[in-house]
Amino acid sequence: MSEPAPAPAPDRPTVPVGSAAIVAACLVVVVALGFVVRGHNAITDADADVVRWVAGWRPQWLISVAKAVTLLGDGRAVIALLVLLLGGLLATHRMAWRSALIAPLSLGLGAALVPALKNAVDRPRPPLSLHQVVESTSGYPSGHSLQAAAAWLALALLLRARGRQRAAIACVAIVVAVGCSRVVLGVHSPTDVLGGWCAGTAVGLAVVWCAGRRRPV
């Protein structure tokens, strides 16, 4: 009688079935939107309508919340939080050091991708009069949304592999909240955010997939 196969190592991050297809689909969306938002069409008109509607409705308390939430997509703030969270897991021997590097690596790759995409598309942001925070770069894609997706989704997959479902869901919620905050603050259109989410998801899944092919330490 053969022995049962050993259970997978808990530190090994897992990726959803069909991850390659998801990454490919995300990249297609990023490129397609990049071409679409460079022109004037029904999608860009709808984009502008949504931004104007949100700007005319947003109460001051929501703006304050959005300013706090958007920090969870800022590279410097995210790396600081990751150092604290992952450092705690390492100190208590709940995570291998290679696994702890996954989310920071994903964040770094995502951050490097942001200026390349912004320069390639060079889409203007919404009107300056709608901005609630100071921004100077191009609009597409949303860098905060991209970085949030790259870092927090990678961490979500790692936590999910360790059975921490609620923590993983919280990470996904952060990604959604950061993207919405950029529209509330008037500095991005919905398609900017969607492009950022897709690009960040592609980066996060790719990094986790590559890491999952190696034995954890």
Image (spheres, helix red, strand yellow):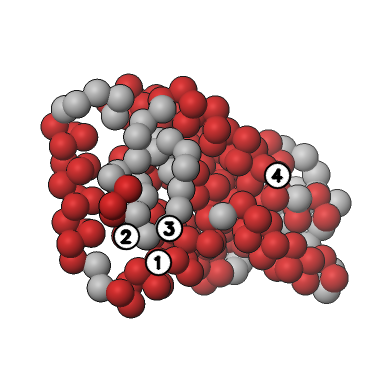
**Residue sitting at 16 percent across and 41 percent down?**
46
Q: Which amino acid does label 2 sit on?
A: Val
Mark in the foreground, 3 or 2: 3
Q: Earlier in the sequence, mark 3 or mark 2?
A: 3
Location of residue 84 (image quadrant): bottom right
Residue bearing the label numbered 2:
184
**Residue sitting at 41 percent across and 27 percent down?**
122
Residue bearing the label numbered 3:
133
Does the CB distance between marks 2 and 1 fall below 8 Å? yes
Does the CB distance between marks 3 and 4 fall below 8 Å? no
Q: How crowded is mark 1: few (under 14 residues within 10 Å), some or many (20 or more)?
A: many
Disc 2 versus disc 4: distance between alpha carbons?
29 Å
Q: Which of marks 1 and 4 is nearer the N terminus?
A: 1
- Checking the image for residue 190, the label placed there is none
Q: How crowded is mark 3: few (under 14 residues within 10 Å), some or many (20 or more)?
A: few
Q: Please tell me which residue lies in front, 161 or 40.
A: 40
Q: Is mark 2 on a helix, strand or loop?
A: helix
Give how far across and how far down residue 211 sits, in percent: 71, 41
- Checking the image for residue 105, the label placed there is 4
Give how far across and how far down residue 52 sits, in percent: 19, 52
Does the CB distance between marks 3 and 2 fall below 8 Å? no
Q: Which of marks 2 and 1 is nearer the N terminus?
A: 1
Residue bearing the label numbered 1:
66
Q: Is mark 3 on a helix, strand or loop?
A: loop
Does the CB distance between marks 2 and 4 fall below 8 Å? no
Disc 1 versus disc 4: distance between alpha carbons?
26 Å
Disc 3 versus disc 2: distance between alpha carbons?
10 Å
**Residue sitting at 77 percent across and 71 percent down?**
88
Disc 3 versus disc 1: distance between alpha carbons?
10 Å
Disc 3 versus disc 4: distance between alpha carbons?
27 Å
